[in-house]
Amino acid sequence: MSSSTAAAPARSTEPVRTPKLRADATRNRERILLAARDAFVELGADAPLDEIAKRAGVGNATLYRNFPDRSALIREVALLIKSRVLAIAESATAEGSGPFDALQRFAHATVEEKIGALCPILTNRVDPFDPELVDARERLVAAVGGLMTRAKETGELRADADHGDLFIAMSQLTRPLPGTSCRLLDEFVHRHLQLFLDGLRAPARSTLPGRAATFEDFHPDH
């Protein structure tokens, strides 16, 4: 190998942090991300960026100044959802009521983020090994794991359920049925989520078939 050949730079494993913004710029950025989340749920990953800007109440230039392309926007939506769900879990933990009540509050607040409808987009359009996304995922696992562990320790949560069972149910309940509108889903999701949560209560009325799903089942290397 020639001594004049430059070595390829090593790929950084450090998270790409978003620079600090002014208050108005921060509000615009979050409005864009929430509008993008809802547009992706209704129209898919190829939802027109012009439509997202319109829903957010900003000009196209503002959208592109914050997110240079669709990939960057989808990545930031993934980070937003994970950070919002993490905040919900931490808030439910800190409120100090019974563990199962905290778990229920977490589940009902989390389905508002429409994680099931977004799952195919976020799975197929983002790098699962992105360091910032990995960090957010690990913190979420720890927070939700704590909620469920405490509910089991008090005897309120059935012993044969695990973290993955909860997230599979929330994902399925927030994924629109073929041929139905998102509004129909919004009307019934909390009703059916509560039916599922009631089934998680101990003492269990039945023995669940198969094994409990865990967060490891969702890991990219699984």
Image: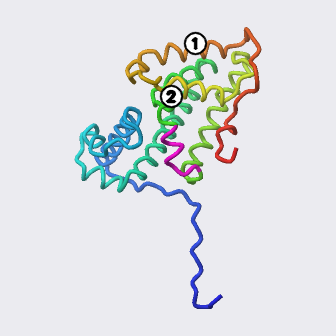
SS assignment at label 1: helix
Circle 1: residue type: Leu
Residue 150: say if magenta.
no
Residue 125: say if magenta.
yes
Circle 2: residue type: Thr
Horizontally, residue 193 falls left or right of residue 36, namely right
- Residue farthest toward the top in the current orientation of the protein: 205
- How far separated are the C-alphas under marks 2 and 1? 16 Å
- Which residues, given as a range, are shown in magenta? 120-128
Eyeballing the image, is 16 above or below 196? below
Horizontally, residue 46 falls left or right of residue 95, namely left
Q: Nearer the viewer, mark 2 or mark 1?
A: 1
Q: Quadrant of residue 164?
A: top right
Q: What residue is disc 1 on?
A: 195
Q: Quadrant of the N terminus?
A: bottom right
Query: Callout 2: few (<14), some (14-19), or many (20+) C-alpha neighbours within 10 Å?
Result: many
Eyeballing the image, is 211 above or below 121? above
Horizontally, residue 11 falls left or right of residue 155, namely left
- Residue farthest toward the front in the current orientation of the protein: 179
Viewer-nearest residue: 113 or 149: 113
Viewer-nearest residue: 41 or 204: 41
Q: Which mark is residue 68?
A: none
Q: What residue is disc 2 on?
A: 110
Are the residues flagged by discs 2 and 1 in contact, CB closer than 8 Å? no
Q: Quadrant of residue 144?
A: top right
